[in-house]
């Protein structure tokens, strides 16, 4: 699913899935899963099935992200 989103538009964007007509939005897809249960460096191997138009109202696509860093002044 990420490859389809990356090819759709260059850069960051939001897609409203409530009005989407592309057939793939209504069929099962595999998406990387994120969250507390997904290890930091092997996240790309954790996938979960979903039907985009059923499971979400919209998707925000971030083309590039970086590793998290502490904000200045918040070091413990």
Image: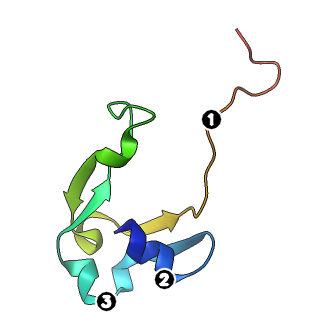
Mark sitting on residue 68: 1
Mark 3 to mark 2 CA distance (whole Å)? 12 Å
Asked if labels 3 and 1 touch by Cβ distance under 8 angstroms, the answer is: no
Please name the residue that numbered disc 2 is placed on.
Answer: 8
> Rounded to the nearest whole Å, what is the CA distance between mark 2 and mark 1?
26 Å
Q: Secondary structure at mark 2?
A: helix
Q: What residue appears at the point 49 percent right and 73 percent down from the top-left corner?
A: 6
**Callout 1: helix, strand or loop?**
loop
**Quadrant that contains the C terminus:** top right
Q: Position of residue 65 (x, y in %)?
A: 61, 51
Percent from the top left, x then y, of residue 60? Answer: 51, 64
Tell me the number on the disc at residue 22. 3
Q: Position of residue 19 (x, y in %)?
A: 37, 86
Of callouts 3 and 2, the N-terminal one: 2
The image shows residue 13 at horizontal and vertical percentages of 58, 72
Label 3 secondary element: loop
Q: Is residue 70 left or right of residue 44?
A: right
Q: Residues within 10 Å of mark 1 (few under 14, many from 20)?
A: few
37 or 55, nearer to the observer:
37
Residue for point 25% across, 82% down: 24
Q: Disc number at residue 36?
A: none
Calculate the distance from the C-alpha at mark 1 to the C-alpha at mark 3. Answer: 34 Å
Location of residue 43 by image quarter: top left
Residue at the right extreme of this rendering: 73
Around disc 3, counting alpha carbons within 10 Å, would you say few (fewer than 14), some (14 to 19), or many (20 or more)? Answer: few
Whether pointer 3 and pointer 2 mark residues with C-beta atoms closer than 8 Å, the reply is no
**Which residue is rendered at x = 61% and y = 78% of the image?**
10
């Amino acid at each position: 699913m990420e490859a389809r989103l990356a090819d759709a538009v260059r850069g960051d964007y939001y897609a409203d899935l409530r009005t989407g007509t592309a057939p793939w939005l209504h069929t099962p897809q595999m998406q990387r899963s994120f969250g507390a249960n997904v290890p930091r460096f092997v996240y790309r191997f954790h996938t979960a099935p979903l039907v985009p138009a059923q499971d979400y109202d919209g998707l925000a696509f971030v083309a590039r992200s970086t590793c998290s860093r502490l904000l200045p002044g918040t070091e413990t």
